[in-house]
Image (cartoon, coloured by chain):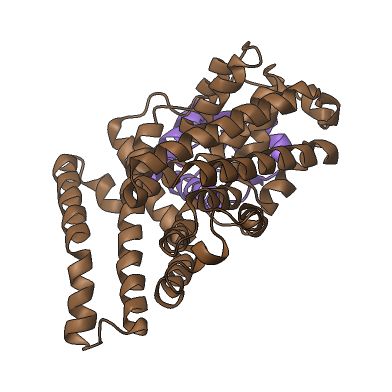
Chain colours: A purple, B brown
Amino acid sequence: MDIKILGSGCKKCITLEDRARKGAAELGLETTIESVHDPVAIAGYGVMRTPALVIDERVVVAGRVPAVEEVRSLLLQASRA
Amino acid sequence: MRWLRTSRSGHGAVLAGLVATWLILYRINESLWETVLFGWLGLAPEERLSETLRFFFYDSVKIALLLSGIIFVVTVMRSYLSVERTRALLAGRREGIGNVLAGLLGVITPFCSCSAVPAFIGFLAAGIPLGVTMSFLIASPMVNEVAIGLLFSLFGWRITLIYISSGLVIAILAGWVLGRLQLERWVESFVYETKLHGAALDGSLALTFDQRLQMGAEEVTSILRQIWPYLLVGIGVGALIHGWVPTNFFATYAGPRNPFGVLVAVGIGIPLYSNAAGVMPMVQALHDKGLPMGTVLAFMMSVVALSLPELILLRRVLKPPLLVAFFSVTGLGIVLIGYLFNALLP
């Protein structure tokens, strides 16, 4: 599973990345986590408010930091799809 | 804010408890510090140092309380709005009406200047005119919701309305002027070629009320954690001004009749980079010592709306001539507002 965190490197993006890492570890998923800082690349995803969570090239959350439980269920959904 | 997540059933009670604590703290703040400093520590109230200390402690707690309350309420309310919806509302608008709408939406849309570039690209790629996009980008930091809340608490509704309306006028007019100047060729060309893959995800939809409350609580802790140094420096400077600068000092040297007052204030304000929260205690102290309101507002707007980090960010999408135009039109607007209110307000 390919996870991307879109964000300018602000505090919230780091929090989101931590939660994604934690969620993936708890579920025992094989993931790669990458931070995308480039604003132009971020705009390419159609995201206008960071941070955003992208799983396998699909934006699942934008503009807020979901709680760990929510991240976990998003990852679970994506892994079943 | 773990308890907010774990105690699913008792949210109402937790919230009520928090509101009550907030009200009590706000109520006892002043007498508490007077008791501690003048009663327990035996400082003389009329001495400058003790007055400076009292102002510092009292104001720190007061501003922290105000900020927590304002940020929480604003975040929860704003979780019902989104940049995506704003963009949809602006799509297909003509200039003029578009600028007005963009200014208004810029005030209420949840937005941080760190997302200025993706939003700029997203707006232009959706066919929204450059000038209308600029109105949004100017209004968003300039008429800041935290500044509105703080101004209202510290100066009352009249000054707050003046701040909101003048900020809006600047954003609307500056965006309109920039649009009229036909500066599209000074936008980096890739912006218009950006292909948006995938449908935009609206972050405001399908959230439970619990999630919105949690967002509010997290926003409060994250912002306070981020800005407390600015806040303490701002309140510290405010306290020093309060204690050591003679009354009417600014009225004498930078009063409404001084033609350079506003220019100097904006000149100092632009390189200073702080947020509304950090600058407000200073603003309050400056005004107490006789700095006229127009100069105060101009100073605050230039600190909040124009900054070097934003300039560097926007350079990614704007070529230098447009960047210069953006900054000078906005700066000019702020200066004019400053003079206008120095002339109008007593």
- At 68% across and 37% down in the image, what residue appears? B117
Residue B81 image point, x, y percent? 44, 27
Q: Is residue A63 left or right of residue B43?
A: right
Q: Position of residue B259 (x, y in %)?
A: 64, 53
Picture coordinates of residue B47, whole percent (x, y):
32, 85
Q: Quadrant of residue B169?
A: top right
From the top left corner, tell me how far across and down residue B240 is, in percent: 45, 75
Image mark count: 0
Q: Nearer the viewer, residue B4 or B76?
A: B76
Q: Front-most of B280 and B218?
A: B280
Q: Please report the residue visible at 36 percent of the width from the left and 72 percent of the height from the top.
A: B56
Q: A77 or B219: which is nearer to us? A: B219
- Which residue is found at the position 42% from the left and 46% from the top? B146
Q: Is residue B235 visible?
A: yes
Q: Relative to B126, is B79 on the left or the right?
A: left
Q: Is residue B345 left or right of residue A13?
A: left
Spot the residue most to the bottom.
Answer: B42
In the displayed structure, would residue B316 be above or below residue B287?
A: above
* Placement of B235 over or under B193, stated as above or below: below
Task: Give above or below for A39 relative to B241.
Answer: above
Q: Tell me if residue B122 can be seen.
A: no
Could you say which quadrant of the image residue B260 lies in? bottom right
